[in-house]
Image (spheres, rainbow, N blue to C red):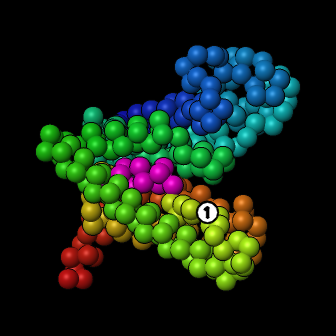
């Protein structure tokens, strides 16, 4: 058992190291396959021993081996979190094809969270991979079909919620604008359509449905709102740009928490009937 956990941890570290490449290059429109790893400041190609997960950052003391520019702590953090994700899933389900796919789905959510936090964007390519791994992270064909069904239900539910909230917000702005109408501009409507939720969030919801199912997925959505609430309160009164808090990280964290404690949460739900 200990050997399997160690293997899962090392595998998570290795994939996490590549995940850093994905997080860095996809928002820039660069290839994640071609082009050797290099320092983003001086452009020097990194040696193999500069790319050892966790250890290289520690040995280099968080600085480039050539120009001594500080290396973002994001790199070791992503590698360590990736390793811990694989370790937690291996401890829960042991090492298997299904648990590997589930781990990869969570790693895609991790990459989406970091990119959303840094760039306020959610790449479709990673979202589709997250859904793919979540749907096929099942132990049998019936499970794959059920995961796909739950993904569609959550995507559809979030889509309806998006349209409802967007309509309400846009209507509110329109009604407020009517109060400022004059005889000169009464025939012109320049009310912008306000998007309450992005399409990327809908795809993340599909991943949540596939990983957790209906009941646990709803719990994760509620938990994500609770996690985001303190941040939303802190951002009140700031500029409109600063108030755009990325929501994918909260969805991902809540999904992982609910996934780890699914049995306890389901027992609590059943006891509440």
* As drawn, 233 above or below 108: below
Look at 45% across and 32% down and name the residue there. 11
Kindly tell me whether residue 94 is visible in this rendering: no
Q: Is residue 201 magenta?
A: yes
- Find residue 34 and report its horizontal and vertical position in percent: 58, 16
Look at 63% across and 70% down and name the residue there. 187
Label 1's element?
Answer: loop
Is 230 on the left or on the right of 64, as rendered?
A: left
Near-viewer residue (79 or 180): 180
- Find residue 132 and report its horizontal and vertical position in percent: 34, 38
* As drawn, 67 above or below 131: above
List the single residue furthest toward the right: 67
Name the residue carrying label 1. 192
Near-viewer residue (182 or 226): 182
Near-viewer residue (39 or 53): 39
* As drawn, 186 above or below 149: below
Look at 71% across and 22% down and name the residue there. 38
Residue range (magenta):
198-209
């Amino acid at each position: 058992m200990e050997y399997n956990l160690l293997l899962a941890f090392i595998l998570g570290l290795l994939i996490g190291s590549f995940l850093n490449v994905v997080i860095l290059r996809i928002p820039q429109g660069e290839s994640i396959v071609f082009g050797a790893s290099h320092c983003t400041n001086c452009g020097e190609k990194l040696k193999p021993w500069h790319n050892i997960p966790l250890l290289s950052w520690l040995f280099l003391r968080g600085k480039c081996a050539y120009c001594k520019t500080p290396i973002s702590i994001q790199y070791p953090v992503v590698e360590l979190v990736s390793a811990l994700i694989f370790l937690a899933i291996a401890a829960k389900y042991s090492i298997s094809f299904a648990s590997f796919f589930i781990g990869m789905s969570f790693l895609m959510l991790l990459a989406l969270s970091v990119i959303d936090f840094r760039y306020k964007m959610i790449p479709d390519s990673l979202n589709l991979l997250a859904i793919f791994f979540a749907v096929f992270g099942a132990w049998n064909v019936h499970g794959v079909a059920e995961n796909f069904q739950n993904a569609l239900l959550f995507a559809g539910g979030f889509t309806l919620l998006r349209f409802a909230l967007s309509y309400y917000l846009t209507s509110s702005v329109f009604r407020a604008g009517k109060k400022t109408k004059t005889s000169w501009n009464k025939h012109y409507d320049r009310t912008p359509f306000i998007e309450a939720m992005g399409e990327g969030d809908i795809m993340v919801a599909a991943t949540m449905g596939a990983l957790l199912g209906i009941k646990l997925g709803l719990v994760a959505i509620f938990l994500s709102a609770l996690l985001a609430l303190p941040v939303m309160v802190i951002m009140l009164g700031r500029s409109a740009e600063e108030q755009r808090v990325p929501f994918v990280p909260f969805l991902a964290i809540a999904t992982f928490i609910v996934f780890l404690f699914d049995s306890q949460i389901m027992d609590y739900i059943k006891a509440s009937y």
